[in-house]
Amino acid sequence: MGNAKSSAMSKEILEDLKLSTKFTEQELSQWYENFQRQCPSGRITPGDFEAIYARFFPDSEAKTYAHHVFRSFDTNDDGTLDFKEYIIALHLTSTGKMSRKLEWAFSLFDVDKNSYITKAEVTEICHALFKLIPADEQDRLPMDENTPEKRATKLWSYFDKAEDGKLTEGEFIKGVLENEDALHLIQYQPQK
Ligand SMILES: [Ca+2]
Ligand SMILES: [Ca+2]
């Protein structure tokens, strides 16, 4: 409202996003309009992002996980998500190819961004994931994955690494692709 001037996306960003995602110009323009409306400053803050997650996971504590996801989407490390980072994130998590999704999953697990995953980082993300799972659902989990530690140990076993080893992106993606069970352990899909 009264903000029409800021509603055009720069040609450069549009072309860039058309190349890096499969979204059409029309889809991108539509999302840009929505983004501008919901986020007039053009930047999503960690607080905004937590609020979005809280709406998706009303019965659980999504803040910790949201914080990790935010970090993995904030590719230029400036503490906010701009439209480009937002769209790439949306693309990756909805329609992206499996290999791209796993690249993203790697960055989610690489908490300190040093290009390696350790078991401690896997455990930290498993803790955040667990907070997303409602208590009644946690009760129904298999015995060997019903705590964050057990889940981390099970996941780590697929990567053929020592307890104190370091996992590269290639090893992570290979381990997940070769073990169907690993794929469900690295994420949480709400049942509702
Ligand atoms: Ca950013
Ligand atoms: Ca790391």
Image: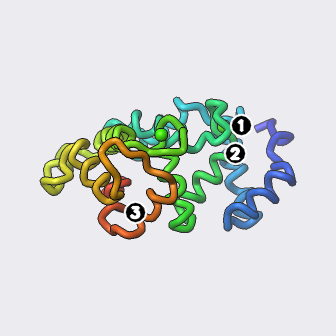
Give percent across and percent down for residue 86: 63, 47
User: At label 1, which amino acid type do we have?
Assistant: Gly
Work out whether 57 lies above or below 96: above
Judge from the rendering whether residue 158 lies leftward or rightward of residue 105; answer left or right. left
Q: How crowded is mark 1: few (under 14 residues within 10 Å), some or many (20 or more)?
A: some
Q: Are marks 3 and 2 in contact (CB under 8 Å)?
A: no
Residue found 71% across the figure and 32% down from its top: 41
**Label 2 CA crowd tier, 10 Å (few <14, some 14–19, many 20+):** some
What residue is shown with label 2? 83
Amino acid identity at mark 3? Val
The tally of labels here is 3
What residue would you read off at disc 3? 176
Q: Nearer the viewer, mark 3 or mark 2?
A: 3
Q: Which residue is drawn at 71% across and 37% down?
A: 42
Q: Upstream in the sequence, badge 1 or badge 2?
A: 1
Give whichever of 60, 81 is nearer the camera.
81
Mark whose residue sits in front, 1 or 3: 3
Residue 145 at x, y percent in the picture: 20, 52
- Dot 2: what SS? helix
Q: How far apart are marks 1 and 2 (CA)?
A: 7 Å
Q: Residue at x 28, y 47 (%)?
A: 152
